[in-house]
Image (cartoon, rainbow, N blue to C red):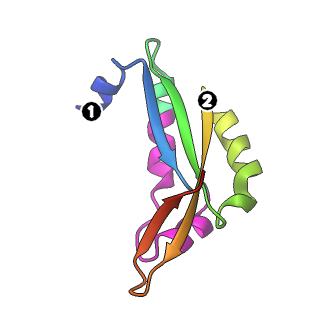
Amino acid sequence: MLKKDILLLDEVYINLSFFTKRVFNTLNPGIKFNNDVVIANIKDIKTHKKRPKIIIVYILTRYNLSEIKNALRSMNELGIDRVEFKPCEIVCSVNEDLMFNKKI
């Protein structure tokens, strides 16, 4: 089971670019919002005595800048060990596919 393997690690990095359904639906139209599953898994990992540090890599886009304060509050309540911010520009191409370009 994956969860048992995760407990053997020193650190777990989780990429997130949303904390609210509104932002998720903007970035992922037509895909079911499963943030509750991610949060439940983090809470479960945090209950174990020997557990990895949980690091959230929060992908910053123009769509989620308005939720940073609430996202940080939620991550603090979850007991996240560290948060890293990575800027990313979302550009729609001619065929409407999403392409991600990291800004330096």
Horizontal arrangement in the rendering, residue 101 relative to residue 73 (left or right): left
Name which residue lies at 34% across and 26% down: 6
Question: The disc labelled 2 sits on which kind of residue?
Answer: Arg
Question: The disc labelled 1 sits on which kind of residue?
Answer: Leu
Say whether disc 2 or disc 1 marks the residue closer to the N-terminus: 1
Q: Position of residue 66 (x, y in %)?
A: 75, 61
Query: What numbered label is drawn on residue 82?
Result: 2
**Which one is nearer the viewer's eye here, 61 or 39?**
61
| Above or below 87: residue 48 | above
**Residue furthest out toward the front:** 104
Name which residue lies at 42% across and 17% down: 10
Label pair 2/1, CB-CB below 8 angstroms: no
Q: Position of residue 34 (x, y in %)?
A: 45, 57
Name which residue lies at 43% across and 87% down: 94
Q: What number of labels is visible?
A: 2
Q: Position of residue 54 (x, y in %)?
A: 51, 29
- Residue stretch in magenta: 20-42
Mark 1, residue position: 2
